[in-house]
């Protein structure tokens, strides 16, 4: 949602694969939100607590941290 009268835009401060693949796009398209932000702590929480990443992380066992990051990004 962009309110130009008060120079306001709404950004989400979390990421989770299921949400990004489903509802987030709809919110962007409808103008409810303008985007999402992240940081290392948010990313770490998303990949360690969400079941959406579990299978992919298991398949990356033995890879370097950089390779894992690039596969998940």
Image: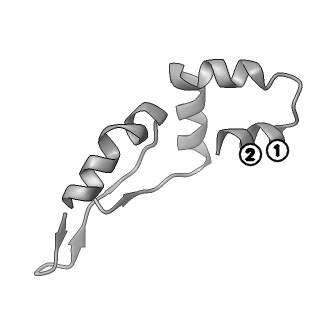
Which residue carries the number 2 mark?
Answer: 70
Q: Is residue 33 above or below residue 60?
A: below
| 20 left or right of 51 in image | left
- At 53% from the left and 33% from the top, the residue drawn is 46
Q: Is residue 65 above or below residue 4?
A: above
Q: Residue 48 sits in which quadrant?
A: top right
- At 52% from the left and 19% from the top, the residue drawn is 51
Can I make out residue 69 in this image?
A: yes
Label 2 neighbour load within 10 Å: few <14, some 14-19, many 20+? few
Which residue carries the number 1 mark?
Answer: 66
Count of numbered tags: 2
Which SS class for mark 2? helix
Q: Residue 38, how many percent across, how many down?
A: 51, 52
Task: In the rendered structure, find residue 8 and report the number of the disc placed on it.
Answer: none
Q: Is residue 61 above or below residue 17?
A: above
Q: Nearer the viewer, mark 1 or mark 2?
A: 2
Q: Residue 57, how many percent across, how many down?
A: 70, 24
């Amino acid at each position: 949602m962009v309110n130009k009268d008060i120079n306001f835009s709404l950004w989400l401060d979390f990421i989770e694969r299921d949400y990004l693949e489903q509802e987030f796009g709809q919110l962007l398209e409808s103008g409810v939100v303008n985007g999402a932000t992240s940081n290392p702590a948010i990313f770490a929480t998303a990949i360690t607590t969400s079941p959406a990443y579990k299978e992919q992380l298991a398949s990356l066992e033995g890879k370097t941290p950089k390779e894992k990051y690039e596969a998940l990004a």
